[in-house]
Image: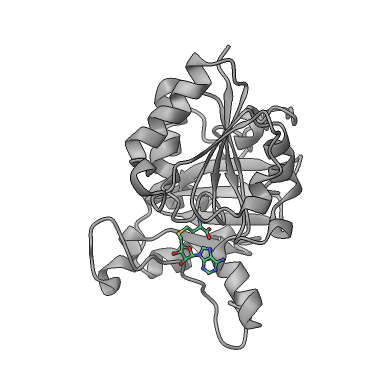
């Protein structure tokens, strides 16, 4: 039986900013592949019997390429007895962590995985600087952007809408109004999006659709987040005939959830 890979966020570096779920996964780990920025105090949570491997770029000649890291995850899950393989990344694993390539490799190999989110550097930095990133008197958008993008483009190009993901807080209850605002700001009706209600909770629901479809959807449970952009496209293509696609929690071992019904407005 193949092992399961947990892609875990280690938070910004203080051990007590690690989530309880991340700590539990680390305590159960047999293999840990971690980045440089993860502190020793967090690695100390792993059992003494665990194989802990630094795959970070700062690890001198032992630094691994992305392809090697992908191959290591797949190999440990498939070819060894290990049941719990942890890929530990700083901050949140899904924010500038090359997670996309790793998920592609795991999906291609048919290996079960779960993402454990973490406190991202933007949140930690704001807390340290004693500022709020979205003070309503000063800011209504928070743009998470890298100064080192894969295409080596200038910052002005990097923040183009077509190359950006929008994570909208408080998108409801009038989704049609929200969608119209996005269309007016230059998004196409065909732009993929994901609506996530109760993210990370037992009653989590995920819908993959386009902005054009979202405009007429009613009854999405709150609290919800709307994620807009090409990053949601893959799931949209995979959903087949169902507008309500995968429930992201279905692959999670300790939390067995029922599938959620297709909303009448989408059926
Ligand atoms: N996945 C990480 C980001 C990885 S990119 C996250 O969600 O935070 C690495 C960059 O994150 C660093 O170059 C730095 O800009 C930032 N970073 C990570 N940890 C940080 C910390 N404790 N303080 C300030 N910046 C940090």
Q: Position of residue 15 (x, y in %)?
A: 70, 57
The percent coordinates of residue 60 (x first, y second) are: 37, 49
Instruction: Tell me the residue at 59%/25% (across/down).
Output: 4
Q: Tell how many labels.
A: 0
Q: Residue at x 23, y 65 (%)?
A: 153
232 and 101: which one is in front? Answer: 101
At a point 64% along the width and 45% down the height, the residue shown is 43
Quarter holding the N terminus is top right
231 lies above or below 168: above
Residue 68 appears left or right of 218: left
| In the foreground, 78 or 191 | 78
Q: Is residue 257 above or below residue 97?
A: above
> In the rendered image of this protein, does residue 143 appear above or below residue 234?
below
Quadrant position of residue 157: bottom left
Q: Outermost residue, bottom direction? A: 137
- Where residue 257 appears, x then y in whole percent? 73, 30
- Please indicate, yes or no, whether residue 222 appears anywhere in the rendered image: yes
Quadrant of residue 101 within the rendered picture = top left
Q: Would residue 234 be seen by someone viewing this image from the given angle?
A: no
Residue extending farthest to the top is 1
Q: How is the image coloured?
A: one colour
Seen at 69% across and 53% down, the residue is: 18
**Residue 20's x, y, as percent?**
76, 47
- In screen coordinates, is 82 left or right of 190? right
Q: Quadrant of residue 49?
A: top right
């Amino acid at each position: 039986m193949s092992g399961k890979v947990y892609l875990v966020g280690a938070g910004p570096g203080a051990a007590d900013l690690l989530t309880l779920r991340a700590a539990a996964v680390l305590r159960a780990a047999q293999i840990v592949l971690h980045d440089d920025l993860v502190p020793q105090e967090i690695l100390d949570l792993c059992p003494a019997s665990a194989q802990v491997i630094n795959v970070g770029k700062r690890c001198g000649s032992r630094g691994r390429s992305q392809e090697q890291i992908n191959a290591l995850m797949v190999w440990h899950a498939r070819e060894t007895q290990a049941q719990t393989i942890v890929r530990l990344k700083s901050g949140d694993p899904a924010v500038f962590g090359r997670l996309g390539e790793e998920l592609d490799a795991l999906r291609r190999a048919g290996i079960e995985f779960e993402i454990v989110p973490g406190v991202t550097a933007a949140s930690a930095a704001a807390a340290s600087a004693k500022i709020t990133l979205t003070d309503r008197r000063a800011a209504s958008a928070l743009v998470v952007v890298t100064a080192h993008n894969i295409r080596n483009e200038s910052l002005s190009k990097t923040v183009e809408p077509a190359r950006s993901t929008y994570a909208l807080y408080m998108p409801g209850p009038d989704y049609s109004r929200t969608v119209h605002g996005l269309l007016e700001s230059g998004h196409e009706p065909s732009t993929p999006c994901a609506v996530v209600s109760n993210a990370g909770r037992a009653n989590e629901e995920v819908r993959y659709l386009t902005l054009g479809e979202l405009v007429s959807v009613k009854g999405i449970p709150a609290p919800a987040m709307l994620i807009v952009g090409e990053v949601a496209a893959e799931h949209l293509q995979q959903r087949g005939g169902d507008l309500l696609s995968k429930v992201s929690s279905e692959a999670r071992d300790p939390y067995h959830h029922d599938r959620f019904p297709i909303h009448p407005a989408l059926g």
